[in-house]
Amino acid sequence: MEMGQIRYVLSAAHHLNFTRAAEECGVTQPALTKGIKALEAELGAPLFNREGRRISLSGFGRSMLPHFRSIAEEAEATRALADNFRLLAQVPVKLGVQNTIGHLRLARFLAEFERRHEGIELAVSEAPRGELERQLDSGELDLAIFTRMDDGDDRFRLTPLYEERYVVVFPPGHRMAAANAVMLGELSGQPYVDRLACELREMVMGVCKSRDIDLYARFRSEREDWVQAMVLAGIGFAFMPEYSVTLPGLVQRPLIEPEVSRNVVAASVPGRQHSPAAAALMRAAQGFRWPG
């Protein structure tokens, strides 16, 4: 039994005419008739009743037709999977990641994705959220991962990934390291490292001002690695998203009163068709067991 023979039978059953079926299958009528007769001989019964130029399905043919359709559909699905696999390796996925998002959790996700989708090439770049939005708009990126802001922007389709709290990061031996959690008021007058790239910085600073909480910034930087390194060196504490803390030895405690958190999302452009590889990455992001 060959796929070509099954195609011949399905087309002939649809048209009830060997000539039209041959035209649809792109073969000559004698070739189609020969293929169907060979299949009938293999199965041991006629699939069609032949009455001159008229044909009709035999009882055996009607009983076999659903099975032939199932075989044809499975073969088509297999071809589609094979085509998609070839396409996955042809075009790299261009993924942008906001520069304030910790890389450890993302690295675990991307490593699992590559294990499950061998041959897919990922091109990952890092930039502030505003630049990622511009690159998404222009088509320079397929997908982006950034923090969701309550700005009412509906230019992008946002898929929630995970939520993370803000924590207070101390150097080892800091007097507040023994606490289970830290209230913002307890930090008044304490030297700290100002994380300039924090998207919630203005909100925290506003709360501090409204409560007369004085924070003395001994060091300022937009770089996550410098902020953590200076905290570890004992310059002061810092506010950090909990999954962005990467340096061993740092002590982190949840920030309470107020509690501060952010939502990390995957962003794409509505209506823009993904490549098979980009679509596979989005499905993987939706199904991944993110922290928390």
Image (spheres, helix red, strand yellow):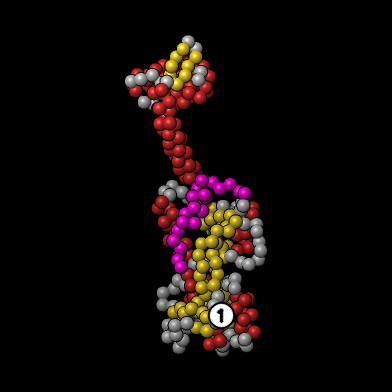
**Residue 157 position in % (x across, y down):** 60, 56
**Residue 210 position in % (x across, y down):** 64, 84
The residue under label 1 is 258
Evaluate whether residue 208 shows in this view: yes
Q: In the structure shown, which secondary structural element does the residue marked by tag 1 occupy?
A: loop
Magenta includes 107? no
Q: Residues within 10 Å of mark 1 (few under 14, many from 20)?
A: few
What's the amino acid at mark 1? Pro
**Residue 66 position in % (x across, y down):** 43, 31
Q: Which residues are magenta?
A: 271-292
Give left or right: position of 49 versus 269.
left
Please, is residue 258 above or below residue 71 in the view? Answer: below
Identify the residue at image location x=43%, y=25%. Answer: 62
8 or 135, nearer to the observer? 8
Evaluate whether residue 26 shows in this view: no
Identify the residue at image location x=61%, y=66%. Answer: 149
Magenta includes 288? yes
Say which quadrant the N terminus sits in: top left
The total of numbered circles placed on residues is: 1
Identify the residue at image location x=56%, y=80%. Answer: 258
Please, is residue 241 above or below residue 217 in the view? Answer: above
153 or 122, nearer to the observer? 153
**Residue 198 position in % (x across, y down):** 58, 72
Identify the residue at image location x=42%, y=34%. Answer: 70
- State the image quarter where residue 214 is shown: bottom right
Give left or right: position of 281 versus 206.
left
User: Which residue, as the protein is rendered here, is positioned at the far top?
Assistant: 52
